[in-house]
Amino acid sequence: MAHTVVEQEKNYNILKDAAGDIMILIRARMEDVEQPKIVYNGAEHALLYRNSHSAIVLDYIHPNVREQLERTSSVLVVETRDNSVIREYNVPMTFLKEIPLPSSLERIPS
């Protein structure tokens, strides 16, 4: 059974461009992105699965952004390091009543 490591993203930004598209900026990770998805419950937390063994908790989403996230089907995630873009990718949104954090997930600080 695959083991998923869950990190908490301490510094991230959620931006909206003139067309209304949403972009999430996070710190770049070493491993590749494979079939990413975001699980969101409409509240203050979201879970970005970068691949089958890596997930990132986006904590304390601002109330002004929550409604916009609920209305979108995907977002652009941009990973940066030293003010340079390392990778960017579109991520579909999945909406659930509760964000799944099974006890089998290892939660580590970023």
Image (cartoon, helix red, strand yellow):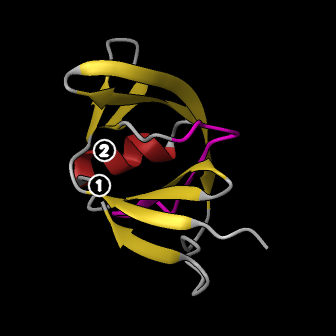
Q: Is residue 33 above or below residue 5?
A: above
Amino acid at dot 2: Val
| 43 in the magenta segment | yes
Q: Residues within 10 Å of mark 1 (few under 14, many from 20)?
A: some
* Foreground pick, 62 / 24: 24
The residue that disc 2 covers is: 65
Q: Residues within 10 Å of mark 2 (few under 14, many from 20)?
A: some
* Foreground pick, 82 / 65: 82
Is residue 73 shown to the viewer in this render? no
Residue at horizontal 30 percent and vertical 44 percent from the top: 65
Q: Is residue 22 above or below residue 34?
A: above
Amino acid at dot 1: Ile
Say whether marks 1 and 2 touch (CB < 8 Å): yes
| SS type, badge 1 | loop
Q: Which residues are magenta?
A: 31-46
Q: Quadrant of residue 109?
A: bottom left
x and y percentages locating residue 11 in the rendered image:
21, 48
* Foreground pick, 58 / 105: 105
The residue that disc 1 covers is: 61
Q: Point out the image quarter for the N terminus.
A: bottom right
Q: CA distance from mark 1 to mark 2?
A: 7 Å
Residue at horizontal 54 percent and vertical 41 percent from the top: 31
